[in-house]
């Protein structure tokens, strides 16, 4: 698992919601929600955050469920 520096983390924003991102394991998760209340998760691959809408997975609102592929 790659830990991002505090300086880098403070600059990154979710490309879909514009909200801050928090690291959760090997992913970054948006702190804000989309139109349907979902949050978005982005993988960190070899220390590089993949902040592309195509790489996002959704985290359903109000559930403890893991990420599901975006668009489902």
Image (spheres, rainbow, N blue to C red):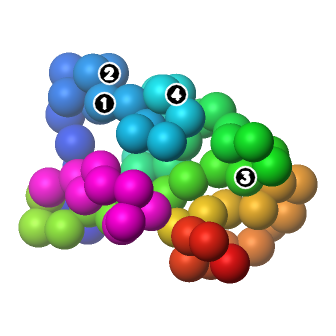
Report the Cα–Cα distance between label 4 and label 1: 9 Å
x%, y% of residue 50? Answer: 25, 58
| Residue 5 placement: quadrant | top left
What residue would you read off at disc 3?
38
For marks 2 and 3, the one nearer the N-term is: 2
Residue lying at 62% horizontally and 71% vertically, measured from the top left: 71
Residue lying at 27% horizontally and 21% vertically, measured from the top left: 11
| Residue 64 placement: quadrant | bottom right
Report the Cα–Cα distance between label 2 and label 4: 11 Å
What residue would you read off at disc 4?
19
Nearer-the-camera pick, 4 or 43: 43
x%, y% of residue 65? Answer: 75, 73
Instruction: Determine whether, in the image, residue 54 is placed left or right of residue 49.
Output: right
Secondary structure of the residue carrying tag 1 is loop
The reply to whether the magenta stretch includes residue 14 is no
| Residue 26 placement: quadrant | bottom left
Decide: marks 1, 2 in contact (CB < 8 A)? yes
For marks 4 and 1, the one nearer the N-term is: 1
x%, y% of residue 72? Answer: 68, 78
For marks 3 and 1, the one nearer the N-term is: 1
**Span highlighted in magenta in the image:** 48-56
What residue would you read off at disc 2?
10
Residue lying at 68% horizontally and 42% vertically, measured from the top left: 34
Secondary structure of the residue carrying tag 4 is loop
Looking at the rendered image, the disc whose residue lies closer to the viewer, 2 or 4, is: 4
x%, y% of residue 63? Answer: 85, 63
Report the Cα–Cα distance between label 3 and label 1: 19 Å
What residue would you read off at disc 1?
12
**Quadrant where the N terminus is found in the figure:** bottom left
For marks 2 and 4, the one nearer the N-term is: 2
């Amino acid at each position: 698992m790659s830990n991002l520096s505090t300086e880098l983390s403070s600059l990154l924003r979710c490309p879909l919601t514009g909200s801050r991102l928090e690291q959760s394991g090997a992913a970054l998760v948006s702190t804000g929600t989309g139109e349907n209340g979902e949050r978005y998760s982005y993988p960190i691959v070899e220390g590089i955050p993949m902040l592309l809408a195509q790489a996002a997975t959704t985290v359903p609102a109000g559930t403890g469920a893991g990420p599901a592929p975006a668009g489902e």
